[in-house]
Amino acid sequence: MKRVLKVVVALLLPLSLTARENVSVFVYSPAPSDGLHIAVQEGNVWREAGRLCSSDYGTWGVEKKMYHPSVCRAQDGTWRLVFQVNDRASLFAASYSRDLVNWRPQDYPIMSTKQCLEPVVFPNPDGTFDVYYKSSQGKRWTSVTPNFRDFAPDRASQIGDDAWVRDTATISGKCYEGNGFEISSMEWEKIEEYFRQSGEDWRKTNERMHDDAKNPVLPKEPVRATLDVDLSRQKSISDKLIGIFFEDISYAADGGLYAELIQNRDFEYSSRDHRGWTATTAWHSTRPIQIENGHPLSANNPHYAIVTTDTLWNEGWDGITVEKGKNYDFSMFVFAGGQKQDFQIMLIGQDGIVLAKSKLKTQAGDWQKYTTVLTAKVSDTKARLAIVPLKVARVGIDMVSLFPQETFKGRKNGLRKDLAQVIADLHPKFVRFPGGCMSHGQGLENIYHWNHTVGPLQDRKPDFNIWNYHQTRGLGFFEFFQFCEDIGAEPLPVLAAGVPCQNSAANALGIGGQQGGIPMDDMPAYVQEILDLIDWANGDPATSKWAKMRADAGHPAPFNLKYIGLGNEDIISTVFEERYEMLARAIRAKYPDIKICGTAGPFHAPSADYQEGWDFARRHPDLQYMLDEHYYESTGWFMHNRHYYDSYDRNGAKVYLGEWAASTKTKRPNVETALAEALYLTDIERNGDVVEMTSYAPMLSKDGHSNWNPDMIYFSNTDVRTTPAYEVQRLFSVYGGDTYIASSFSGIDSTCQHRVGASVVRDSKTGATYLKLVNALPTELSLTVRGLDIPATASTEGFAGSPEEQQLTIVKGEAGNAIVLPAYSFRVIKL
Ligand code: AHR
């Protein structure tokens, strides 16, 4: 205790007494949602310099708060931070920094007490640290190893209140509590430089094509330039650069790509899915619908409806769209006990007319599936399904289903044909599924378990969807793998790395965020679950029960899974790293050929998770073949970060840019976002030796149910609308290659080089060469191409428009004798 007091006294020394070449700084939090700031003393005045870090704990909007930060400096000059996250959780936040500006992702060590209030941290001479905090059980103490990751179980402490005495400083007229330090002027210069650079980056990032008329550096007259193509400088690049990201967000799966027309077919909706939802949501009757669970069809689907004499109606997903002359497969399970029931199954149009009908006779007895086919006599976009009992009898019904017979590739339990076709037209080289945040889930209980999504539909385990609705799991892993095969894409399943989403709400114990991860005792079972997936996908049905399950579902041949993703933009905490390592080691040991993809967190450099994610990959090169980076950014950011991958280590892990999209204030894909993405993709192709895969995200969004914007494809029950983002992805995918040929511009002013892009790739399979040209300038660009023979008859495909346009017209033509790119245009020339 003495030692602690000494440190506190040292911190309280008047800052003016210290050596001249040092700079006095003060770290503090101006407000809980504003994180940790630093101020510098100039004369007698404290000047706020900027934000150092902020809380990453818990859900957005409600949590992410930093209370009572306490910072100390270790003997080796590094920094440690602890803070309180709220007044309920049995944890505090802890972080580490070498320079005060870059902080390691926060850890939230779980203590034995109900609360961890006002934690304070002190360094010990042996390199360890003491953390004291207050709780309703009195003052507590825990000690931490030098790496600031391993916290001892907490114990009662008799430490005096002096430990909580903090420094104060008045900044902009307001007095704050915090910690004061003397740092060298060199250290301070680095901090200032960091803030200066961030400010400059931020200004560049704000550049918008929409504002070009006011941009003084851009040309007002047509530009003439030369593109030199150097055929002697070629390199191999990934032939899987463009794939797709599939997540059940914005009704992408249920009510979307999954062709099921009945909503809440399993009567499993509840308020966990969405506030106010119940087992009867989307169902209607003249009297309250009776729901029971005493004799379930499957333990995973406990609820079913009782039908006696009243008609049951289902409203579908915003209505049921049916087309005249088309057939629809109806099915339901009926449990009739001792009574027989017959039904009239009907589709009723908006005007009350009968669009289709068919009788269904059921037998007395236990649960049994009954089927019939409905043929629509008239088209309607908002039909309803009616289940009309024809006798007086009491039966249970469950898994009520209606599928168009026309699904993508005619698959049973298949996908919506029009939507799947638009996706297939992208020719994606891989499909990432099932998310996104849905993979790691809202809390431990909601982690996506692939094995809950295979087998008979009634036995699959539905769950709530992190995006505030319901997952039936009708579109499960079998359907995902089958879709990949149907469109010639590699499957890339991404599963939780033993931790839920770091933005999760608190569990029953009041612990939010990663919730401490899957308990270590349960990890072996989770590791086995991931190994089972590989066995299910690739194993031999004669020897493996999982592979037999695949074969029984209709696919005896292996799916030939090559990649697996572990983690989705997680906070790269100690809890994450421990679990990731367990999973990856087990996969490496049993399936050394499987390429494992790790994660670099939710943001680009220099974010904490990005840095720690890549550091972790460098420390464990055997555990990550590839790292998943995510960033959603402004068009300005993409235009000014064109060299992002140029300096990546060619001998390290590959990059999977797994989620990305450019956006403007309108949050809709338009010509401006498309051109920013096209520019960036020319740079991705140049770096195709280190970037192996990319996928724009999110892919799908249903009208009226959007959780996120912008998206690549918008749809309703009746139409599918592609966007400028889609066209850019399609053009880069269809006209991709496996060899990159170097090229460079001359004649373009350095102030606007970020607005033009070119990339030459060759596809060794077809022998075709593609030249992609992007002109994001507000003026025409006349180009002389040297080093590449471009016949006037070479075919071209592309678009031009004004930055705000959301609808593109794809123009096909011929190269002609002169290459003139209109303002704001993109063109592919096929050679
Ligand atoms: O793409 C939408 C969401 O963005 C994903 O679920 C998540 O990974 C990211 O935050």
Image: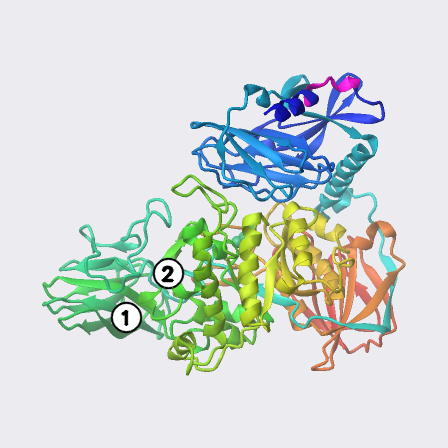
Q: Does residue 452 appear to the left or right of 746 in the view shown?
A: left
Give the amino acid at mark 1.
Ser
> Quick one: which residue is furthest to the right in this view?
747
Of residues 450 and 81, which is closer to you in this image? Answer: 81
In the foreground, 67 or 145: 145
Q: Main secondary structure of the magenta part?
A: helix
Residue 581 lies, in percent from the top left, at 57, 58
Residue 371: x and y in percent read: 26, 74
Residue 465 is at least partly visible in this image = no
- How many numbered badges does the structure rendering display? 2
Residue 51's place in the image compared with 816, above or below, is above
* Residue beneath disc 2: 472
Q: Please state if 280 lies on the left or on the right of 471 as rendered.
A: left
The image quadrant where one finds the N terminus is top right
Residue in view at x 25 percent, y 67 percent: 346
Highlighted magenta segment, given as a residue range: 11-17
Q: Is residue 505 above or below residue 816?
A: above
Q: Nearer the viewer, mark 2 or mark 1?
A: 2
Quadrant in the picture for residue 146? top right
Residue at the disc numbered 1: 331
Q: Is residue 213 visible?
A: yes
Q: Which corner quadrant of the image does residue 546 belong to?
A: bottom left
Q: Is residue 434 above or below residue 18?
A: below
Quarter location, residue 713:
bottom right
Q: Quadrant of the C terminus?
A: bottom right
Q: Is residue 187 left or right of residue 545?
A: right
Circle 1 sits in a helix, a strand or a loop, which is it? strand
Question: Sequence-wise, which precedes: disc 2 or disc 1?
Answer: 1
